[in-house]
Image (tube, rainbow, N blue to C red):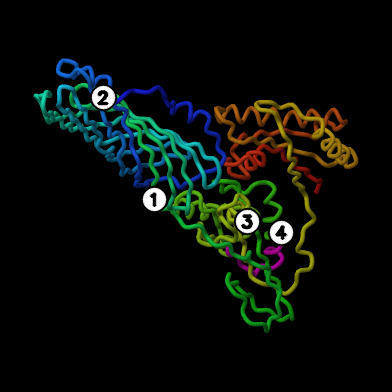
């Protein structure tokens, strides 16, 4: 029996190289699955006729070249683009019957099963849909059975062979839930039978894959309100506020909402103004206390998200303490991903869930607690060509407005921050250099519009302060931004 080799190769390295971070189609970590489908072998009828040429004047052959196959597998997904997968496969049984003249028959069949270890390259297409390719090593056990009648004599009716070889394939996956996905795939196995024939067996499969430890998508919740209520009113629902006894008819409770960049716990410049208002409030009312709550989206493990949210809350507490609020009046609590206010299946929802809240004890008077803003942040959506810092004409028109404002307010200074998405193939150092060049290009443009260079500074942050996940075109565009921080004199 002969399985004919056909042309076709898959370069997993090439697949990984073109994999752009459009969306993460599944959770990272351990997974397992089952695939079932149809398999096909290519039987070399010409070789069979050649083997029978010494006993047969003519030969007609009936092939049984299709069967059902299946595989069981488990794997580990290291990141959105690569996984390692191993398992058991059964390609089924194939055979032929040759009728000879003089009268005789020659029948043969082969069963193929074995173990595989594959390197899988993944190309995310959307949040639920991905394509993948694989190359791998297989260890196949082949059991052949041959028989003859009449003019045909078989000397070795049951040969067996175990041998290593290779496989490759392509597939698509659609995630039905965070944990369960549907796979459709095609694979080609290079196999040798027990009598020295070499060829390929193809298998088309449909199956399910389950990711262990995946978290269910959270339900969207209503954002926490700001409570302004009479003293005699019924207690407000969670979050529970620490109430200071009051004698007036109204009380003021402040809930601070600061969003964080991805996987970051540092309070950024544009958020410090919000915390400064908390400082002003607590200085005005020295009997008040505050609970700083940290929250995260659900990307990452539960334990990591809990640590990150706690770190975010403690970072805000440290900022308040540095600015004169006694630590005994402050408490930091991390809730991880357990209290979402939006749907984590969208980029906007994830961004809303990466936040801290400051639950501040109530006071009786709010007069004078809002400080005059000392800094304004302008986030400019500026498109740059790949690996370029050149400013487009339409962006120059917007910058001219900023320049006019700065010239009309000569005491205001500005810091230009450059940010990038994690560009494919670029190292962190290259991303940092590119963001610095882009920030400096903006500074140069403002100088050309007549702003004194001594009032301007440029800072590049590379992709270290992502505003959105780089798993969609929209997310990459939001990360590829320029912030202009306007500092007002005190």
The answer to whether residue 166 is above or below residue 283 is: above
Q: Secondary structure at mark 1?
A: strand
Q: Is residue 334 visible?
A: no
Q: Quadrant of residue 162?
A: top left
Query: Horizontal and vertical percent for residue 337?
Result: 51, 57
In reply to whether residue 284 is colored magenta, the answer given is: yes
Query: Horizontal and vertical percent for residue 119?
Result: 38, 33
Q: Earlier in the sequence, mark 2 or mark 4?
A: 2
Q: Which residue is mark 3?
A: 320
State the residue at coordinates (54%, 53%). Answer: 297
Q: Secondary structure at mark 3?
A: helix
Q: Quadrant of residue 437?
A: top right
Whether residues under marks 2 and 3 lie with C-beta atoms below 8 angstroms apart, the answer is: no
Query: Horizontal and vertical percent for residue 459?
Result: 68, 34
Q: Earlier in the sequence, mark 2 or mark 3?
A: 2
In this rendered view, identify the residue nearer to me: 119 or 227. 119
Structural crowding at the residue carrying mark 2, measured as other residues with C-alpha within 10 Å and reported as few (<14), some (14–19) or many (≥20): many
Q: Which residue is mark 4?
A: 277
Closest to the camera, between mark 4 and mark 3, is: 4
Q: Earlier in the sequence, mark 4 or mark 3?
A: 4
Whether residues under marks 1 and 4 lie with C-beta atoms below 8 angstroms apart, the answer is: no
Query: How much space separates mark 3 and mark 1, taking CA atoms?
Result: 45 Å
Q: Which residue is mark 2?
A: 2
State the residue at coordinates (73%, 40%). Answer: 381
Q: Quadrant of residue 279?
A: bottom right
Q: Earlier in the sequence, mark 3 or mark 1?
A: 1
> Which range of residues does the magenta coloring cover?
280-291
Q: Earlier in the sequence, mark 1 or mark 4?
A: 1
Whether residues under marks 2 and 1 lie with C-beta atoms below 8 angstroms apart, the answer is: no
Q: Which residue is mark 1?
A: 210
Query: How much space separates mark 2 and mark 3, taking CA atoms?
Result: 77 Å
């Amino acid at each position: 029996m002969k399985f004919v080799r056909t042309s076709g190769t898959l370069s997993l390295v090439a697949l990984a190289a073109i994999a752009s971070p459009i969306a993460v189609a599944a959770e990272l970590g351990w997974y397992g699955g089952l695939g079932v489908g149809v398999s096909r072998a290519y039987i070399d009828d010409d070789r069979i006729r050649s083997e029978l040429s010494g006993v047969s004047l003519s030969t007609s052959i009936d092939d049984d070249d299709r069967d059902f196959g299946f595989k069981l597998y488990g794997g580990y997904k290291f990141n959105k683009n690569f996984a390692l997968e191993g398992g058991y496969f059964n390609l089924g049984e194939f055979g032929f019957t040759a009728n000879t003249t003089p009268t005789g028959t020659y029948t043969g069949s082969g069963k193929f099963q074995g173990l595989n270890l594959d390197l899988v390259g993944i190309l995310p297409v959307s949040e639920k849909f991905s394509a993948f390719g694989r190359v791998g090593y297989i260890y196949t056990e082949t059991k052949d059975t041959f028989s003859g009648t009449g003019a045909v004599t078989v000397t070795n009716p049951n040969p067996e062979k175990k041998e290593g070889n290779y496989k490759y394939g392509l597939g698509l996956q659609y995630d039905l839930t965070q944990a369960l996905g549907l796979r459709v795939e095609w694979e080609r196995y290079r196999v040798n039978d027990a009598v020295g024939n070499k060829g390929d067996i193809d298998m088309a499969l449909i199956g399910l894959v389950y990711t262990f430890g995946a978290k269910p998508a959270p339900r969207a919740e209503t954002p926490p309100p700001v409570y302004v209520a009479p003293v005699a009113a019924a207690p407000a629902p969670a979050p529970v506020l620490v109430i200071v006894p009051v004698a007036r008819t109204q009380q003021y409770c402040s809930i601070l909402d600061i969003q964080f960049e991805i996987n970051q716990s540092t309070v950024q410049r544009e958020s410090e103004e919000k915390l400064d208002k908390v400082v002003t409030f607590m200085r005005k009312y020295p009997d008040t206390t505050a609970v700083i709550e940290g929250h995260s989206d659900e990307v990452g493990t539960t334990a990591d998200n809990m640590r990150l949210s706690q770190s975010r809350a403690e970072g805000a507490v440290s900022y308040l303490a540095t600015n004169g609020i006694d630590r005994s009046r402050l408490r930091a609590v991390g809730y991880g991903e357990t209290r979402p206010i939006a749907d984590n299946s969208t980029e906007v929802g994830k961004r809303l869930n990466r936040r801290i809240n400051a639950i501040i004890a109530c006071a009786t008077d709010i007069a004078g607690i809002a400080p005059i803003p000392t800094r304004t942040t302008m986030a400019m959506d500026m498109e740059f060509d790949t690996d370029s810092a050149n400013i487009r004409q339409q962006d120059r028109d917007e910058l001219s407005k900023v320049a006019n404002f700065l010239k009309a307010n000569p005491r205001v200074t500005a810091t230009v921050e450059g940010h990038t998405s994690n560009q494919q193939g670029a190292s962190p150092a290259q991303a940092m250099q590119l963001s610095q060049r882009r920030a400096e290009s903006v500074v140069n443009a403002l100088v050309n519009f007549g702003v004194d260079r001594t009032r301007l500074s440029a800072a590049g942050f590379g992709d270290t302060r992502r505003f959105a996940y780089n798993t969609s075109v929209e997310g990459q565009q939001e990360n590829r931004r320029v912030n202009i921080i306007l500092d007002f004199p005190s």
